[in-house]
Image (cartoon, rainbow, N blue to C red):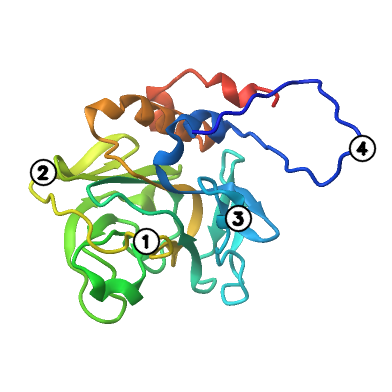
Amino acid sequence: MIDAQIVHGTEINNLTGLPQLTITPLDIAVGSIGYDWAMLLDPDWVDEDGSRARNMPRRFEYGVSFGSSENPSISTGTFPSGARSFYAAQGGGAGFGMSAPGRPNANAWSWVGVAKIEPGTPMRMYANNSSIANTGDIGIYIAISNTGSTLTLFEKWLGSAGINVERLQATVNLQNDTAPSLLEVDFSVGRGITILKNGVVLAQNANDTRPLDLGLNAGDNSALIGARGHHGINGLLNFDLSHPSRVPERRAIEEFAAWQYDIPTLKAKYPQRPAYFDMSL
């Protein structure tokens, strides 16, 4: 972990081209999780070179096809709360794809993402690239159905090469939601698979404890392929967020999502607005 100290009021003259440290509420909320993020994409972390992975050193954080000429419909938008989003309109092209840096943990991982969808095509929220599908049996392929009614974890993304095999599916009915939702898929070899929406368990399979054997290298996976509507943070953790020892990390993520994206179910769970949203940094 790298520590940083912020000193207010300090002036340094006659220096140019220095790196700048920008701190957002997300940094304070989940910064303590540190290097346990295999990937963290954030709509507030976008510049002229594309979307940057929040968890990667600057020299590695790009390589994202955000706003590419192949997908001209990609843009940033705004959630009803005023928070920035990744946005692609229904019927507006191929959606958008973001390379997922970092290396997933084969034995324990959790995916989290905030979404207010517009139904259209199936949305690959996080998935191994089809080019590596024949290198193993179990990857991560998390998809929202084209109607928005289900969230499914499949064995792996095959592309057009075959039928994707389901591991666990939950009914989420995102098409009926007027507010964004925090979606979550957890896995560990000790606890199996859990799917949650806004902190509520919707589906579990404690018997499927098969670890990953593909998609374990940087660049093997992608996020937000074919996505429609507004999408917030999208991240992969290298631990099982449903484990009882991870209560502090769960609270940090849920509390941030509640107030950043105005999610009523989570705001009822965490009624006190975190002070970091009002800090001057």
Residue drawn at x 68%, y 24% is 6
Q: Is residue 250 left or right of residue 55?
A: left
Density class for disc 2 (Cα within 10 Å; few <14, some 14-19, many ≥20) is: few
Marks 3 & 2, CB-CB < 8 Å contact: no
Q: Residue 59's mark? A: 3
**228 sits left or right of 112 in the view:** right
Residue type indicated by callout 2: Ala
Residues at circles 1 and 2 in contact by the CB criterion of under 8 Å = no
Which residue matches tag 2?
A: 206
Q: Nearer the viewer, residue 203 or 222?
A: 222
Q: Which residue is mark 4?
A: 14
Q: Secondary structure at mark 1?
A: loop
Where residue 63 sits: x, y (%)? 55, 64
Amino acid type, mark 3: Arg
1 or 4: tag closer to the N-terminus = 4
Q: Count all numbered tags in the image, as a single digit.
A: 4
Q: CA distance from mark 3 to mark 1?
A: 17 Å
Q: Closer to the camera: disc 1 or disc 2?
A: 1
Report if the CB atoms under discs 3 and 1 are less than 8 Å apart.
no
Furthest residue toward right: 14
2 or 4: tag closer to the N-terminus = 4
* Measured Cα–Cα span from mark 2 to mark 4: 60 Å
Task: List x then y, in percent, for residue 203.
Answer: 18, 45
> Residue at left 35%, top 76%?
131
The kind of residue on which mark 1 rests is Asn
- Residue 255 x, y percent position in the rendering: 44, 28
Q: Which residue is mark 1?
A: 217
